[in-house]
Amino acid sequence: MSNLPVAPPAFDAQVKARVQRGPDVGASCALVFLELLALAVIVVVWPFLDHFDLDPASDIETVSLWRYLPALGGVAVVAFVAAVLAGRARATVTVVSQGSMAVLVTLAFFGGAALQSHQDARDCPVVCSAE
């Protein structure tokens, strides 16, 4: 009786996990690419086009980060929501990548806010300083 063939298991959890890892990695890479593209537009293209001027006689105005920080915060919120939704779908690669993107963009947001706040306080005239 020991020579009987053994049937393969009806449900193999390891095979199922490997099959679903591909779309998880693909979605994670696509989301990170789109977020990096959005960050490049917010940080590089938008300020460049906002202050592009061919008139040499025009005054140069300082760049304030307050105009760009809400868009940066929006990218952080999208990354956080994507991480939460991926967690509910048990897509671990997407959770890790979107969670790290949310943390990094949030740090950039608060760093930019602190930098602009410091710059505003330094450029404040004597009239608006506390007495």
Image (spheres, rainbow, N blue to C red):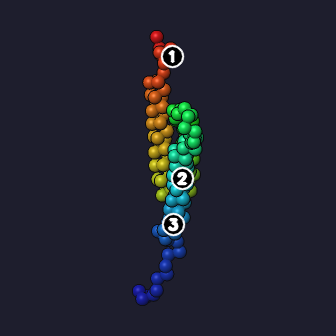
Give x and y (percent) for residue 129: 47, 16
Instruction: Say whether marks 1 and 3 touch (CB < 8 Å).
Output: no
Earlier in the chain: of badge 1 and badge 3, it is: 3
- Name the element at disc 2: helix
Residue at position x 52%, y 33% from top?
60
Front residue of this view, candidates 99 and 2: 99
Q: Which disc number belongs to residue 128? A: 1
Classed neighbour count for the residue bearing mark 2: other residues with Cα under 10 Å, few (<14), some (14–19), many (≥20): few
Q: CA distance from mark 2 to mark 1?
A: 39 Å
Earlier in the chain: of badge 3 and badge 2, it is: 3
Q: Relative to 70, does residue 2 appear above or below in the rendering?
A: below
Q: Which disc number belongs to residue 37? A: 2
- Name the element at disc 1: helix
Specify the amino acid type for callout 2: Leu
Specify the amino acid type for callout 3: Gly
Residue at position x 56%, y 34% from top?
58
Residue under numbered circle 3: 22
